[in-house]
Amino acid sequence: MQQRLDNAIAKKLAEKRKQKAVSLVGPPLPRLPARLRIPAIFDQAGEFHKGSAPVRMGDKWGLINTRGEWVLAPTFNAIGRYSKEGLLPVKSGDKYGYINHLGTEVIDFVYDDAKPFSDGLGAVKTSEGWGYILPDGKIYMKPGFDDAGAFKHNIAPVKLEGWGYALRKWDQGLTAKRWLLEPYYQKTFEFSEGFGVFQINDLMGLIDEHKTIRIEPVFLGLKRHAEGLLPASRIQGKWGYVDVEGKPVIDALYQAASPFSEGLASVKKEGKWGYINRHNEVRIPFRFNRAYNFQSGVAVVVEGNDRFFIDKQGKAVSERFVDVYRASEGYAAVKVGDKWGYIFIPPSIVEEEQEID
């Protein structure tokens, strides 16, 4: 008798939980892929951080947890990417501020635009231009730039008529600015592992954090430094890899090339993408229409009209979808039809980051 009563209570509680979930995120779509953990009911979806992810329903953004429940109802006009500081730039009305992963307002909505924090500083825009603030909202660099990129290694690409590199140590006001590279260039890109790519007269070079030009601007194409190498091109449509002195390490055998990540790099040859290691050995054959960098042991690839995840052996670790977004904390946003949901990529796959020779 008691067992039947307990079962009845448990059944009622389960039904209440189901009704609550439906009221929060709506009913699941029919015939969902086997590993879809959160129903594909969103119009757009971002990556998880500390257990919550930004999603859009209609024209409004909110936050959900890994059970698909609302952490923050969809009320914002726009939401940017998470940073390691755990803050998200969000737009309410026509102004930007920042919230944390719990949906709590941390920095007031007083800015015309805002970008994710990096190295403890967030780029924000006022009527005076772009500047930088601290996570507590205090101004660190007074607004006045035409544009401002993310700080990496205490250096950020900024625009003041031309592009240059600003050092984190900066005097207040509009004079006595501290530059690593004066703002006379076509473009400067975010620093990566101690080096920054710059462009002048349509050619690209490399500078280090000590103001030393390591590679003179002689390349048509030069991508970010990662794991000791940079994708480089001197001739249109021919890519290889050079070291930080500009010396060739991998010959320009490829139609396109990406920076190394977790010991592998995606490269294009004869119209197809595959992966090589630092010794230019093919580790995953050239069979994809597109292939992206590895992150947490998995990478996004494209075959025909399908996108899915593979591991470092080239084995598919997810079903195929219309579109996918990178994995974070074991979850990855995927597109089913015209809606987005989330799959779960087992931690045994995500955490397996074997060293590739």
Image (cartoon, rainbow, N blue to C red):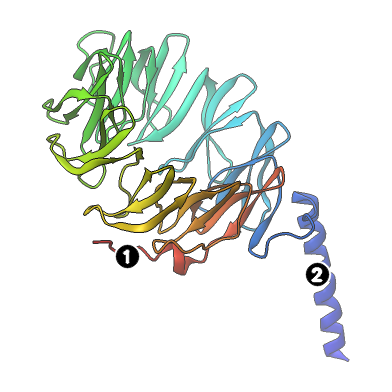
Q: Amino acid at mark 1?
A: Gln
**28 is higher (above) or lower (below) than 246:** below
Q: Quadrant of residue 10?
A: bottom right
Q: From the viewer's perspective, is 62 left or right of 268?
A: right
Q: Where does label 1 land, which residue?
A: 354
Which residue does the numbered mark 2 point to in the structure image? 13
Residue 165 screen position, x and y as percent:
25, 22
Q: Which quadrant holds the N terminus?
A: bottom right
Question: Does 103 appear above or below 206?
Answer: below
Kindly state the secondary structure of the residue where label 2 is placed: helix
**Front of the two marks 2 and 1:** 1
Query: Please, is residue 165 above or below residue 154 in the view?
Result: above
Q: Residue at x 22, y 14 (%)?
A: 177
The answer, for residue 178, to whether it is visible in the render is no
Query: Where is the C terminus found, in terms of image quarters?
Result: bottom left
Q: Is residue 77 left or right of residue 293?
A: right
